[in-house]
Amino acid sequence: MSINADEIIDRRRLRKKVSFWRIATFVVLGLTLLGIIAFSAQKIGLSSTSTDHIAKVKITGVITNDEPMLKLLKKLKEDDKVKAVILNISSPGGSTVGGEAMFEAVRELAETKPVTTNVGTLAASAGYMIASASDHIVARRSSIVGSIGVLFQYADASELLDKIGVKVKAIKSSPMKAEPNPFNPASEESVAMIDRLIQDSYKWFVEIVADRRNMKEFEVLKLADGSIFTGSQSLDNGLIDAIGGQEKAVEWLNKEKNIPEALEIIEHKPKRPTDSIFGNPAAISKIADVFGIKIGHSEAKALEDALRERLPLDGLVSIWQGSGG
């Protein structure tokens, strides 16, 4: 039986149409499933756990005025299932405003339940400020701690501008407006103004450390020249309370605050716009429970790690991770 050219073209068109609708159907089913899962996640409250536990919160990187993190700390304060909190800090510091906001949030949290800090690689500057808000600080012998102080930096590109023949003119309401600026050498008055800001914030930082570490102000001033210290040195200087890791923090919670060592330690993460519902072990456990599958937190955490590692490899699954996927 012979087939003419028109029939061949028609069959190819039909195959393309069928393939298109198959793909479209698959996509619609996938999005529908995601919608059902997201709706179920909202209903069953995936961000909390149903049993008593110790909450762990990681504070890493440059400190900023992190609203999601502040909301998380407030939520932990109000969660009756959270019996204690371990802050896992690994930060070189950041903005003083961010450090101040986090310090205050940790102090409010510590009013309702014990809070201890486990220093990882480093807790310096604003990172140490936050650590000092907790009731107990643990660090490794080789951890970096300290850098108590305040910094203000500005560029002076005036010599470069002179070399290339550029002059920047400004009309200002007063001499100190927008000073210092990178287009002219800083005046003595502007340097003095910035120094007053620095000294005021520095005094406040020193007072915080003296109060939280039960030290005299002159004792803190000896350490607050911007120096950093190892964990061992920090213990000798009174900046931390013990050498060790998370197990030492748990040991302190048990001995000093009567928190059972058997309590599970569950990591809590701030909810951010790009977060996937599969980035939460509690979410994975409860979704599995909806389908009659029983998995513990450790298994859910392992699955979360696997999903984080594999999801970006599949274009369709990357939809689940939002714009950041």
Image (cartoon, grey):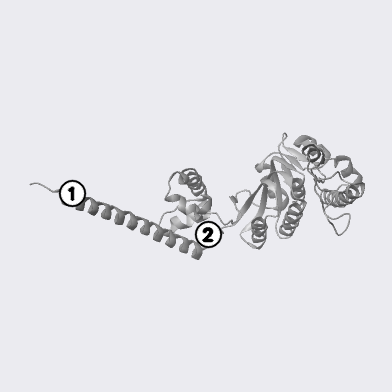
Tell me the amino acid under the disc marked 1: Ile
Residue at far bottom of view: 43
**Residue 88 screen position, x and y as percent:** 67, 46
Residue drawn at point x = 67 percent, y = 49 percent: 86
**Residue 288 screen position, x and y as percent:** 44, 55
Residue contact between numbered discs 2 and 1, judged by CB atoms under 8 Å: no
Q: How many residues crowd around disc 1 within 10 Å: few (fewer than 14), some, or many (20 or more)?
A: few
The one of 21 and 53 positioned closer to us in this rendering: 21
- Please say if 320 is above or below 119: below
Among the two numbered marks 2 and 1 on one chain, the one whose residue lies closer to the N terminus: 1
> Would you say 26 lies left or right of 3 here?
right
Q: Secondary structure at mark 2?
A: loop
Give the CA distance from mark 2 to mark 1.
54 Å
Residue drawn at point x = 34 percent, y = 57 percent: 24
Question: In the image, which disc is placed on residue 58?
Answer: none
Tell me the amino acid under the disc marked 2: Leu
Q: Which residue is mark 2?
A: 46
Q: Which residue is mark 1?
A: 8
> Would you say 126 lies left or right of 265 here?
right
Q: Secondary structure at mark 1?
A: helix
Q: Is residue 216 visible?
A: no
**Residue 66 screen position, x and y as percent:** 67, 55
**Residue 172 screen position, x and y as percent:** 84, 57
Residue drawn at point x = 67 percent, y = 60 percent: 74
